């Protein structure tokens, strides 16, 4: 017995930092410890009630160790600050401990993250082949696609770094090893988990910037990950991590074979083989991989899973609930591949679910969603609920849907019942306001014209409209929150 504590960073129960009060430890890695936290008395009301605090220590470490830890924390903070996607864990804020009375904590970096219910690692420890494995793998693959599309490599994909949320969805986490691509390569610390490390990185070439890595390293890790989740075994032989790493090296040299489990379903066998090609150049890339995984798992195609942000927030819970119910689906409705759910802080999102999870409608059928038809970088209106029926799509303003640049014939005879704002992230004006009449541009402040505004949908939001009015024009705006003079805005201002 060495007497070493299992957590590298010891934080007293009840310790206060910023808006947070530390509770029980949740997990530890080689460098950091994650603690549960709750909002302390007087905390910023905009923050959630629960969070996870990741402490990266200082203590009595050497200057070289401190520099390494600082680099790791900076990598994670940069990724989470720059990439806001549904499959990455959310970061709320970063803090630095200023507490000379606790020298072991003084100067530590604290990353405040959304609270997960657990990791996939803990799930596999109790159920080596979970029934939800295909659905979880789909969401993990979505996260990799989102990262790679944004120009980043995760660098340490493994079950411990896949977190399960309270709504049943999963998030990629722990971006200490993440690296931004410069051309075809990125540079990351020469440290990873051997069981999930691509053969070319087991003995990497190093320079002052670190080890050269490619997105294909994440693809290899996903192949190992998928084989483990679906079969309960690793795809390379060996009774220890070292033995399996040696087998991976021999496999890359052509002197060892993969040992895929006979329990692996045939569609997944092809996927794992495409991921575990012995050379990086022969491995599949993230986008076609996502398509194959979606088909194998029987979930709808979703090139980018949009986050449905709340169109408004209000401290009056009854009014907020009534207004939300008029605009979007009930929270209990689960449909073709998406479930409308809430985080602890009240933010609604759509989470991907397998097709088997479709809920029956009153008529006995299954609710289906058609939002995926909306082209990238477009705003789409639909004649039926849930993105179904006729669709019209635009990438810019249109002052008259019936006689403008892109006519929308069906809008002349019926209301719009759903919308998907699928505009690209890089746009300056990316919220969309829509109006009952044509010629939405008022001369100066025209109270009558502005009163014809029927609604506004934020970037990457989707949902059903009340369907009691028929928009005839729309324009892209900087923010739905500015210039609000709609009925909803007036109700909320009275209650304030």
Image (cartoon, rainbow, N blue to C red):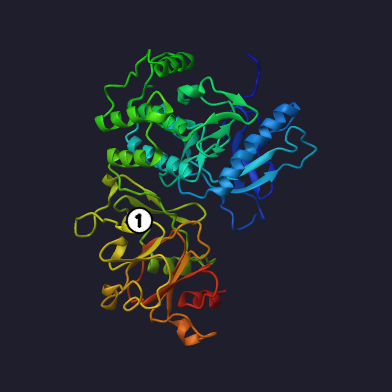
Residue at the right extreme, as displayed:
100
Q: Quadrant of residue 212?
A: top right
Check the picture and name the quadrant holding the N terminus.
top right
Q: Residue furthest left?
A: 364
Q: Residue at x 59, y 40 (%)?
A: 76
Q: Is 91 above or below relative to 404?
A: above
Badge 1 marks a residue whose secondary structure is loop
Residue 263 lies, in percent from the top left, at 27, 24
Residue drawn 49% across the image and 31% down it: 160
**Whole-percent x and y of residue 221?**
44, 29
Is residue 491 left or right of 101 when viewed as pictured? left
156 relative to 463, above or below: above
Quadrant (top left, top right, bottom left, bottom right) of the C terminus: bottom right
Residue 435 horizontal/vertical position (percent): 41, 77
Nearer to me, 247 or 486: 247
Residue at the disc numbered 1: 332
Q: Is residue 270 visible?
A: yes
Q: Nearer the viewer, residue 286 or 463?
A: 286
Query: Does residue 129 appear in the picture of this structure?
Result: no
């Amino acid at each position: 017995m060495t007497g070493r504590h299992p957590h590298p960073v010891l934080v007293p129960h009840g310790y206060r930092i910023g808006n947070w009060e530390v509770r029980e430890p949740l997990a530890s890695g080689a460098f950091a410890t994650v603690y549960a936290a709750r909002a302390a008395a007087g905390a910023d009301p905009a923050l959630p009630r629960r969070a996870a605090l990741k402490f990266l220590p200082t203590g009595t470490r050497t200057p070289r160790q401190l520099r390494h830890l600082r680099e790791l924390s900076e990598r994670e903070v940069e990724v989470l600050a720059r990439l806001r996607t549904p499959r990455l864990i959310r970061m709320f804020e970063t803090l630095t401990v200023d507490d000379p009375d606790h020298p072991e904590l003084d100067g530590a970096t604290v990353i405040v993250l959304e609270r997960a219910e657990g990791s996939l690692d803990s799930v596999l420890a109790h159920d080596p082949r979970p029934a939800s494995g295909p659905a979880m793998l789909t969401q993990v693959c979505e996260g990799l696609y989102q990262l790679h599309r944004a120009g980043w490599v995760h660098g340490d994909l493994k079950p411990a770094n896949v977190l399960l949320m309270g709504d049943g969805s999963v998030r990629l986490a722990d971006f200490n090893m993440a690296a931004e691509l410069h051309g075809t390569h990125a540079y990351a610390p020469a440290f990873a988990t051997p069981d999930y490390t691509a053969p070319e990185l087991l003995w990497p070439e190093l320079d002052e910037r670190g080890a050269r890595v490619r997105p294909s390293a994440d693809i290899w890790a996903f192949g190992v990950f998928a084989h483990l989740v679906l079969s309960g075994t690793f795809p390379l032989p060996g009774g220890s991590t070292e033995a399996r790493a040696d087998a991976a090296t021999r496999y890359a040299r052509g002197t060892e074979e993969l040992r895929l489990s006979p329990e692996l379903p045939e569609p997944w066998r092809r996927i794992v083989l495409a991921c575990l090609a012995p050379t990086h150049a022969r491995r599949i890339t993230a986008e076609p991989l996502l398509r194959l995984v979606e088909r194998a798992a029987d979930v709808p195609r979703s090139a980018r899973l949009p986050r449905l942000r709340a169109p408004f927030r209000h401290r009056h819970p009854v009014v907020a609930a009534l207004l939300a119910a008029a605009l979007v689906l009930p929270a209990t409705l689960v449909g073709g591949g998406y479930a409308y759910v809430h985080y602890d802080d009240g933010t609604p999102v759509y989470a991907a679910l397998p097709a088997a999870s479709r809920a029956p409608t009153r008529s006995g059928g299954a609710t289906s969603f058609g939002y995926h038809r909306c082209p990238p970088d477009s705003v789409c209106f639909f004649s039926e609920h849930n993105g179904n029926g006729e669709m019209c799509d635009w990438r810019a303003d249109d002052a008259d849907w019936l006689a403008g640049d892109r006519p929308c014939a069906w809008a002349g005879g019926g209301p719009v019942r759903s919308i998907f704002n699928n505009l690209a992230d890089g746009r300056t004006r990316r919220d969309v306001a829509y109006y009952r009449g044509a010629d939405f541009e008022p001369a100066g402040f025209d109270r009558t014209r502005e009163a014809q505004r029927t609604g506004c949908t934020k970037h990457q939001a989707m949902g059903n409209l009340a369907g009691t009015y028929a928009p005839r024009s729309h324009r892209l705006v900087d923010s739905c929150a500015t210039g609000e003079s709609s009925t909803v805005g007036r109700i909320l201002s009275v209650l304030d």
